[in-house]
Image (cartoon, grey):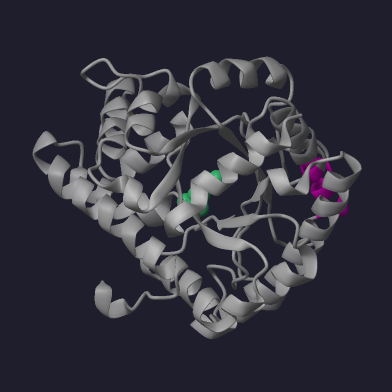
Amino acid sequence: MNKQILKDTIQQLFAGNKGLLAMDESTGTCNKRFAAAGIPQTVEMRRKYRELIVTTPGLNESIGGAILYDETIRQQTKNGMPMADVLVKAGIIPGIKVDMGAKPMAGFSNEKITEGLDGLRERLAEYKTMGARFAKWRGVITIGDGIPTTACIKANVHALSRYAALCQEAGIVPIVEPEVLMIGDHTIQRCYDVTEKVLKILFYQLYQFKIDMEGMILKPNMVIAGTESSNQNSIDEVAEATVNCLLASIPAAMPAIAFLSGGQSPEDAAVHLNAIHTKFKNHLPWIVTFSFARAIQQPALDIWKGEGANLEEAQKLLYRRAKLDSVARQGQYNTVLE
Ligand code: 13P
């Protein structure tokens, strides 16, 4: 394993207060978002949308890396340039989602286990030839009555660790994403407890699997009350719970944390990231930044509607959201900027 390659990639991804853009929605998820926006769910529309994203002028001012989906990394722009090459030319490092999705876990109702380890070594080698320098694997943890079970947490962190080991062997930086879902009516304290447990079990498993701490990125959820909870917390409470939970669970040797947005509005995601920096900057031993999908893309997708005439406007919105998140990463965001 060449540890320096991993370190260099991480350093480049986040230099200049940048974050990551997740544009790795599976075909099913992308189609769901298209359907909600009234956009036809075809290969060509997905290609056009991804072209809109990767050709957004100035995106590299705030985005250091973009996570692609298998279909996208094999697609080209209308001018015949592979999407990954367009990103590289723009100064953005291409990454790739390599998990094959979260499937129902046999014997455990309402819980999921992520698949995709079989053949992963070979797939990573192929993605590397296509330009990918980092990867992503998402485990899904659901909060509910009697769940998550320890068995589900252990199965998911085991898969995450095996994935991370294969990535590091290939010289590809693993983004390790154990997402505790916001769906539910749970309190912020319950989210804290579950997230802490997941992260502690995860980091012990990563240690057992000899993962180089300095050569990986963690992509966690923020600690926040469930979407159906009547008890929503203040910005400062979310920031404090999130930082305390991370400090309690994550080794300082791990270089970077890049949050998922998880269904928060673009404004909420930015406000929370900002508060984490304004209140706790001096306590954070890691780079703390963003790896949002919906919180960056949604306004642009809603404006685009699949129409060429709206392309420029959509790109402007995408650029703007990414920029605001980069500003939040520096603790300089203000809702007035909206
Ligand atoms: P959201 O920011 O929309 O939660 O997506 C992040 C992601 O990559 C989920 O895997």
Q: Quadrant of the C terminus?
A: bottom left
Location of the N terminus (image quadrant): top right
Q: Residue at x 37, y 38 (%)?
A: 91
Percent of width and height locating residue 44: 28, 22
Q: Nearer the viewer, residue 29 or 4?
A: 4
Residue 187 in view, yes or no: no
Residues drawn in magenta: 149-157
The answer to whether 164 appears left or right of 220 in the picture is right
Residue 46 shows up from this direction: yes
Q: Residue furthest right?
A: 208
Residue at 52% of width from left, 27% of height from top?
132
In the rendered structure, the answer to whether residue 291 lies left or right of residue 335 reads right
Residue 246: image quadrant is bottom right
Vertical order, 50 against 126 (above or below): below
Q: Is residue 90 above or below residue 179?
A: above
- Identity of the residue drawn at 26% across and 15% down: 80
Q: Measured from the top left, where is residue 239 in percent x and y? A: 57, 77
Task: Look at the magenta stretch and give its main secondary structure.
Answer: helix
Residue 310: % across, % down:
13, 43
Residue 55 at x, y = what percent? 26, 35
In reply to whether residue 238 is colored magenta, the answer given is no
User: Residue 150: within the magenta?
Assistant: yes
